Image: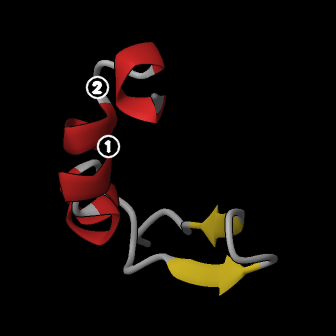
């Protein structure tokens, strides 16, 4: 059911968020899991 309502779910789960942040010019991001389903990602711009 979830996949039928979220067509890009596979791409989301396959996303390497750390690599994307670094490629965008940020330092390695800090990832804090708030709950099982939610997280906070903080990136700092490289000096």
Answer with the quarter of the image where residue 43 lies. Answer: bottom right
* Residue 19 relative to residue 13: left or right: left
* Residue at the right extreme, as displayed: 34
Does 19 sit above or below residue 9?
below
Does 19 sit above or below residue 33?
above
In the rendered view of the protein, which quadrant contains the N terminus?
top left
Element type where label 1 sits in the image: helix
Count of picture labels? 2
How far apart marks 2 and 1 lie (CA) works out to: 6 Å
Q: Residues within 10 Å of mark 2 (few under 14, many from 20)?
A: few
Answer with the quarter of the image where residue 35 lies. Answer: bottom right
Q: Position of residue 42 (x, y in %)?
A: 63, 68
**Residue at the spot 32% in from the left edge and 43% down from the top edge:** 12
**Residue at the spot 68% in from the left edge and 83% down from the top edge:** 32
Element type where label 2 sits in the image: loop
Q: Position of residue 9 (x, y in %)?
A: 32, 36
Q: Work out whether residue 18 can be spotted.
A: yes
Q: Position of residue 21 (x, y in %)?
A: 34, 58
**Residue at the spot 36% in from the left edge and 29% down from the top edge:** 3
* Residue 24 relative to residue 31: left or right: left
Disc number at residue 42? none
The way the protein has been coloured in the rendering is secondary structure
- Residue pointed to by mark 2: 8
Pointer 2 with pointer 1, Cβ within 8 A: yes
Does 33 sit above or below residue 47?
below
Q: Residues within 10 Å of mark 1 (few under 14, many from 20)?
A: few
- Residue pointed to by mark 1: 12
* Residue 32 relative to residue 43: left or right: right
Q: Work out whether residue 15 can be spotted.
A: no
**47 and 36: which is toward the camera:** 36
């Amino acid at each position: 059911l979830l996949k039928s309502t979220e067509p890009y779910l596979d791409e989301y789960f396959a996303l390497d968020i750390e690599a994307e942040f670094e490629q965008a010019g940020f330092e390695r991001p800090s990832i804090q899991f708030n709950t099982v389903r939610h997280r906070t990602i903080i990136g700092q711009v490289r000096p």
